[in-house]
Amino acid sequence: MGINRYGIVVSKKVDKRAVIRNKIKRIFREALIELSKTMSSGHDILLITKKEVLDKTKEEVLILLKSALEKLAVVKK
């Protein structure tokens, strides 16, 4: 089929500081790496973050991302 490609968008509306925006991207990349073992291949996925992500821990981000990808039938349950 192919490979999965990801894009992660964290705008300045989330936080003005680049350090924080890059930290959010790293958290999402770690979650995607962990979930990639159970994902089907051949998908292009764009993740657009919102300001509420600042209040979440890494584990909460992983759970939210997994449930969103399960709804799209990208991650196997």
Image (cartoon, helix red, strand yellow):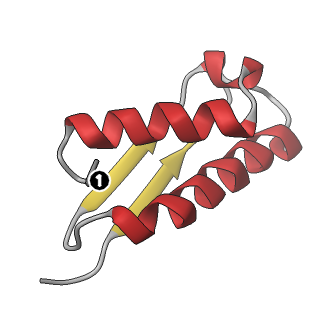
Is residue 10 in view from this perspective? Answer: no
Looking at the image, the residue that sits furthest to the bottom is 2
Quadrant placement of the N terminus: bottom left
From the viewer's side, name the closer residue of 10 and 23. Answer: 23
Q: Is residue 6 above or below residue 4?
A: above
Q: Look at 31% across and 71% down and name the residue there.
A: 4
Left or right: residue 42 compared with residue 57 = left
Left or right: residue 53 compared with residue 65 = right
Image coordinates of residue 25 in percent, x first then y, are 66, 50
From the viewer's side, name the closer residue of 15 and 59. Answer: 59
Locate residue 37: give its quadrant.
bottom left
Is residue 59 in view from this perspective? Answer: yes
Q: Look at 71% across and 24% down and name the residue there.
A: 56
In the picture of the structure, the residue carrying the numbered disc 1 is 75
Task: Check disc 1: other Cα within 10 Å, few if <14, some if 14-19, many if 20+.
Answer: some
Q: Look at 83% across and 39% down and name the residue there.
A: 20
Q: Look at 85% across and 35% down and name the residue there.
A: 17
Looking at the image, the residue that sits furthest to the front is 77
Q: Is residue 55 above or below residue 10?
A: above
Q: Amino acid at mark 1?
A: Val
Q: Secondary structure at mark 1?
A: loop
Q: Is residue 50 above or below residue 67?
A: above
Q: In this figure, what is the number of numbered marks? A: 1
Image coordinates of residue 10 in percent, x first then y, are 60, 38
Locate residue 52: give its quadrant.
top right
Image coordinates of residue 16 in percent, x first then y, are 80, 28
Image coordinates of residue 32 in percent, x first then y, are 51, 58
